[in-house]
Image (cartoon, grey):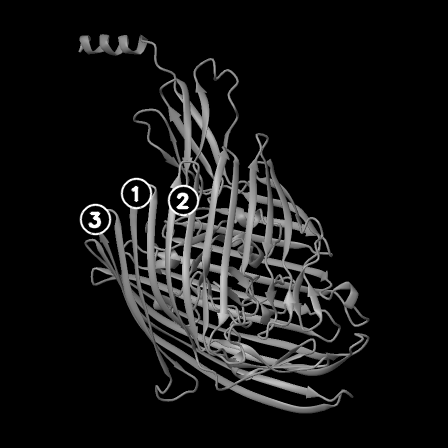
Amino acid sequence: MHALLVVVIALGGMPQSPSFLIHGVVVDPSGSPLDGATVAVDVPGAAPVVTEADGRFELRIMTPGPRRVTVTREGFQPGDAAIDLSPAGQRNPPRELRMTLVPRAFVETVSVTATRGVERLEGAAPVSVVTPTDLQLSASPALDDALRSVPGFNLFRRTSSRTANPTAQGASLRGLSASGASRALVLADGAPLNDPFGGWVYWDRVPQAAIERVEVVRGGASDLYGADALSGVVQVLTVRPRGASASATIEGGSHATPRASVFSGTAGHGWTASVAGEGSRTDGTYVIAPQDRGAVDVRAGSDYMSALAAVTVTTPSGWSLRVRGDGLGESRQNGTPLQTNSTDVRQARFDLALPLGGGQLDSYGQVGDQTYRQAFSSIAASRATETLTIRQRVPASQFGYGLTWRRLFGSSDLLAGAETREVVATNEETAFFPSGVVRSVTDTRGFQRSTGAFAQVRVTLGTRTTVVAGARGDVWQRQRGPLDGTGVVSPRVSVSYRLADRLTIRGAFTSSFRPPTLNERYRGFRVGNTVTVANQGLEPEELSNGELGAHLELPRGTLRATVFASSLSEAITNVTLSSTPQLITRRRENAGTVHASGIETEGEYRVRPGLSVLGALALTHARFVDTPSLSGNRVPQVPIWQGTAAVRWITPGGLTVQTQVRAFGDQFEDDRNTLVLRQAALVDLSLTRSVTRRVAAFAAAENLFDTEYDTGRTPTRTIGTPFTARAGLRLFLP
């Protein structure tokens, strides 16, 4: 005992190595805290730590000397910082180590959308990711404008959703934008954002403060998602809180445009809850070119409010339930006093997961309803007067239900499922004589249902090769009753191979389809002096697509390129029936076959820490091939080339600057290729800087040089957003 006491006293008297406590926070370039980032220090045996919900971390190091701290997080470039852990270096230690991570332009490992699961699969599919930082550094506050940096993405027209009529906001990929309906399926946490009646998208439905990231999968995806995923899938994934947190963006801008977006979430033992909301209004801008403007032309203003709430409960036995609801109220002025529209949307969804048969069974159900209202007018050639022609009111409801089951068998992954979605809507239309007297009142009721079953297997061969094969069968019904609709089979075969440590190549063949929307079948419309007639006899479009791509990862950059060739049969487009200076009449038709081919490239290069160059380019050749009146014509609203280039710089003082050039080539407004929308290039600038740990300030200028560019010809020329500036604050709690 005495000997032990002597040893203890002796040890206590020996000099001890000092310990050093490192406090820090990890943020993105906008100042938003990043949770889930891994922080490590180059000391043997020192365990890495993970940042909390507020982005903060704490490291205790026992070994002195100069050290390097590294930070990694999915979707971001790695970051590092040098620190001096010595008594001399700690005489004036920093109060807090602040590390900023820059988002990667794209990643190959995020595959929530590409696989309909939560796996991280190397090379599973070419997934472009738009991060919150990308959204916050975008010069425009609109989600669809930020997505234009993804190669091949475009709306039906060039017009931003801030001023466009909702019916022109259909999303398309790879040169298939032949009408206003989406050729891509747009989701939010698995719930469809495509309008159930018309297929277009309300891009302001998800508050931006709640967006964790957006994934874009290009190429047919009907093998997993069925109808509407003709050219790909765009999915908005919202924040899943890991602890108590809140954020808000408050801003003001040109054209009397205030905007606020807020998010709050919390988490407990086995549960999470979150709420978000956003509201904005704007006086808008003129959409008619100055030389054509008349007395009836006013600014295209709008206002909206959106809300989202979600609760998730998880049990130790592996069960989980997530319930989500959202709503939108929106109204728009479409450029003249009489042309207005408004929409009210409500939607709810549940997702239930439980272990079953050695795998996991996921079940979901969704229900929603909305009402869309629109007024059309006839405008005199002088644009001095307009006359109300039609008022429309379209109530619509939809519901869907589905099951999926997934199980791993060694190196194989099996996924199988079935789902159905049904839409009911009524087009209530009141037509007027020029005198204002009601001419007619009609109610046209529409119904359609799509039901499908699918299976897919993914096999990993060795350490370099992944093979995916599967198929889906769908039946599309245009009326209630027995299954007498159109049947479609959508197969997929894809192979990815890691040719070298930094090079992956992949090839795929897919088949996909899109049934006509109720809007295309039952609702006509008028834009300017162009009238488009509906067609109840439309048949589904079917797309065959082959592609070959490569992903190259370099120490200071990444590059991805994909070559594709597609054939779209029964392509639905607005076919011109007659054209006079006073009136153009078109009708929706299955206009034969469209051949589209091209190349998509995107990449980034890190010039040095904090300085990156990003770029994307899409070259697309899309033409009608077997319709006598259209053969050889280019598909309307598809430019031969479009691209973006950006420089993103984080200064030593914490200021983040991004300048971007968006450019696009000529495209045609119409199927006859007589109305040209000219090429243009636009320059944007954005800046953001942290003011305190919880406050960041930002400013942005869109179309910096006030370039006037075409967005449509109806046949009157319409133009895009002029120079627009905005500025505000972002707040983060705790």
- Determine crowd level at label 1: few under 14, some 14-19, many 20+ residues with C-alpha closer than 10 A: few
Residue 200 at x, y = what percent?
54, 70
Which residue is under mark 2? 74
Q: Position of residue 572 (x, y in %)?
A: 50, 77
Q: Is residue 38 above or below residue 314?
A: above
Q: Secondary structure at mark 2?
A: loop
Considering only order in the chain, which callout, 2 or 1, is on the residue closer to the N terminus? Answer: 2
Label number found at residue 500: 1
- CA gap between label 1 and label 2 equals 22 Å
In-image side of 175 versus 294 (left or right): left
Circles 1 and 2: CB atoms closer than 8 Å: no
Q: Nearer the viewer, mark 1 or mark 3?
A: 1
Quadrant location of residue 324?
bottom left
Disc tally is: 3
Marks 3 and 2, how far apart at CA: 25 Å
**Residue 123 seen anywhere in this rendered image of the structure:** no
| Residue with the mark numbered 3 | 462
Could you tell me the amino acid type at mark 1? Ala
Whichever of labels 3 and 2 marks the residue nearer the N terminus, that label is 2
Closer to the observer: label 3 or label 2? 3
Image x and y of residue 44, in percent = 31, 25
Query: Reading the chain from its start, which is encountered first: label 1 or label 3?
Result: 3
